Amino acid sequence: MNSQKFAAPSATFTDTGAADFTVPAGGCLISGMDTTGQYSGPSIATKVNILIKGGTTHPTGSNLASPADMNITNIDANSFGSFKVTLPAPVTLPAGHYWVIFQVKIAAGT
């Protein structure tokens, strides 16, 4: 799925993808995320936006995580889209259906 936030002047191409997950009874604590992906082109990602939202059929409501412009750590030597992010504060989620949006930020003009 595509999920990228472009800076000006290419901001009109910004898109967002989301993946849903279910938290079982007892809830969970999220302190970070690892992603596996890929991208192509002359540019590389420098930061990401992370959103966690509730919703049964699509993401709704406010962002429960609120990290924006998060620094990324490359997971492997190639690191062409696989990242590790540590949240500034853990997010506690009660049982329910949620969506995570991991949006890569790429600099303008690249």
Image (cartoon, rainbow, N blue to C red):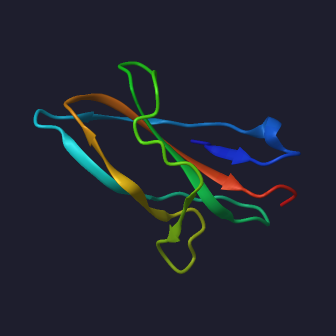
Q: Is residue 44 depicted above or below 108 in this figure?
A: below
**Left or right: 85, with 89 as reference point:** right
Residue at the far bottom: name it.
77
Residue drawn 52% across and 72% down?
74
The picture places residue 73, in percent across and down from the top left corner, at: 50, 70
Image quarter in which the C terminus is found? bottom right
Instruction: Return the x and y of residue 44 as percentages of the image width and height.
Output: 70, 65
**Residue 62 drawn above or below residue 36:** above
Residue farthest to the left? Answer: 26
Residue at (26% x, 42% y) in the render: 92
Residue at (66% x, 46% y) in the render: 4
Count of numbered marks = 0
Where does residue 40 sit, x and y in percent of width and height? 71, 60
Extreme front residue here?
A: 89
Q: Residue at 26% x, 33% y: name it.
A: 22
Query: In the image, 75: left or right of 26?
Result: right
**Which quarter of the rendered picture does the N terminus lie within?**
top right
Seen from the viewer's position, the closer of residues 51 and 56 is: 51
Can you give x and y, in whole percent of width and height, for residue 98 in the image?
A: 34, 31
Q: Is residue 23 left or right of residue 9?
A: left
Give above or below for 107 relative to 80. above
Q: Is residue 35 above or below residue 62?
A: below
